[in-house]
Image (tube, rainbow, N blue to C red):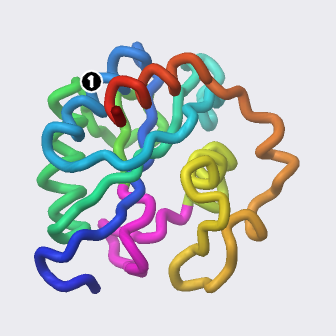
Amino acid sequence: MPDPGEAVSVYVAVGSNIEPERHITEAVRMLSEIMPLTGISTFYITRPIDRPEQADYWNGMLRVTWTQTARALKYDVLRPIEAALGRVRGPDKYAARTMDLDVAIFGEMVVDEPDLTIPDPDLLQRPFLAAALLDLEPDFVVPGTGAALKDLVNTDALHGLKPVKAFSELLKERFLS
């Protein structure tokens, strides 16, 4: 675990399927006012899991610098931003959402607790998360495995993703310059 106050490079997964352009832009703005943003991946259009009637998701990854705990990031920053953008958490974990923010990677930390798992286990199951992280860090090594992410994911699945290039570039221009 990093020392208190030590700056850690953190990867935050971002997704929305309700007015995604507006909600993602607003979430990135809100995060940029709290902590330094050091990277914004390409965002990808993905089909909702088990919900063919829902609109497509837009998913991507942010790299930020954070000096507090992973739990503080999740519960004191990410969850309040989700709520401010209209996210309502209910029993349906696949419900449509205005905003979904998750701590995907927190430095080299490995955590397996009921309410916090790092690295995010979906990283290896959902190609859009792997693609977004590889966009930021092509040689990323997954903490706790010693293995390169690019060697752990199905590269065929990565090729089928639909990037939202213009939107992704606008975010980078606005928040990284």
Q: Residue at x 83, y 53 (%)?
A: 155
Q: Within the image, what quadrant is residue 20 found in?
A: top left
Give the residue at mark 1: 26
Residue 175 appears left or right of 168: left
Q: Name the quadrant containing residue 49.
A: top right
Residue at the farthest right position: 156
Give, as a single range, the part of the protein colored magenta: 103-121
Of 95 and 9, nearer the camera is 9
Does residue 126 sit above or below 123 in this rendering?
above
* Quadrant of the frame with the N terminus: bottom left
Q: Residue at x 22, y 25 (%)?
A: 85
94 in magenta: no
Residue 106 magenta-highlighted: yes
Residue 110: % across, % down: 42, 81
**Three-letter residue code for mark 1:** Glu
Q: Residue at x 24, y 29 (%)?
A: 29
